Image (spheres, rainbow, N blue to C red):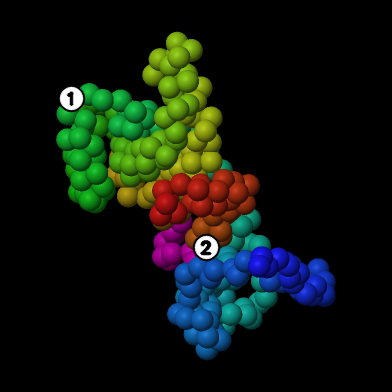
Amino acid sequence: MTSTHVPVRPAHRTVSPVPAGLRARRTRPVPQRGPNLTLGASRLSRALALAALAAMALVWLLPMAWAVFTAFKSEQDASDPLHWLWPRGGFTLDGFRTVIGRGDLPLWMLNSFLVSVAVTVVTVAVSAMAGYAFSRTLFRGRRWLFTVTLLSVLVPPQLLIVPWFRQMLALNLVDTYAAVILPQTVAPVMVFILKKHFDTIPRELEEAARLDGAGHARIFWSVMLPLSRPMLAAVSIFVFIGAWNNFLWPFVSTSDPALMTLPVGITAVKDAYGVNYAQTMSSAVLAALPLVLVFVFFQRHIVKSVATTGLGGQ
């Protein structure tokens, strides 16, 4: 006797539709929190971190605020310790008028501008070529030479003052613009930074240029430099600021008042009664204005270079 198998259908279940908002919330990935750069994740730790940053910012801003306030005082009020914040005679522009009226400040600013621009152009050009050579070429003694370049970063510039001065004497360049400019163009730190930046550029771009018949000079000029504009801008700004603020070497290498740079000239704001604080601070404020303008116009390049290159730890 044969039995027939009758298939049993499963009972039909009614599935209620899931709302779109709930479905989206279920499938949305859970964001992962990155490393916390403050003291912790609690409100107290963040408040302590912000308080510490505010205290450090205040310590940094106080000398600048004192310099600005002193620049707008008269010489008598600038020397009065009892009215260091608000002068008895009110704020005045006498310090700026005196400094500008003497005619020395425009000459000092012109000398500083010429020296800083020349140092920046030569330093960036030499450092970029050296960084490209260390990054993209192979030659005998390459590792040893790069090691010497890194070790030279550890040498304080103050130790090189006497050798530099004797070298300028031997070349008969003392009291010239060349004596002020040439020793400042040696920047091993910038060579290292640009070398690390060139290492991050894909080699496929260089190989494609070689297939088109380009050599090292063409690759450096047409491939590497256009891709390194943010880093070159940042390096140029750092070098320019360092050359503009440099005091020791321009002070040692020149004795001609016509070749004084701004930091050297500010120290000469004296008379028979001593230092004129209002005039000195007025000169310092005017000297800082070009640097502020440079940073304001080029801060985008600085931030981009720090965020996308080795300066950001990447």
The image quarter in which residue 118 lies: top left
Q: In front: mark 2 or mark 1? A: 1
Q: Which residues are magenta?
A: 269-278
Tell which of 307 and 83 is nearer to you: 307
Horizontally, residue 207 falls left or right of residue 175, namely right
- Residue that label 2 marks: 281
Residue found at x 40% / y 32%: 128
Q: Nearer the viewer, residue 160 or 285?
A: 160
Q: Is residue 99 magenta?
A: no
Q: How far across and how far down the image is residue 189, in percent? A: 33, 44
* Label 2, label 1: how far apart the Cα atoms are: 53 Å
User: Considering the numbered disc 2 on the image, is that residue within a helix, a strand or a loop?
Assistant: helix
How many discs appear?
A: 2
The residue where tag 1 is placed is: 140
Evaluate if marks 2 and 1 touch, with contact meaning CB atoms under 8 Å apart.
no
Q: Give left or right: position of 262 versus 24.
A: left
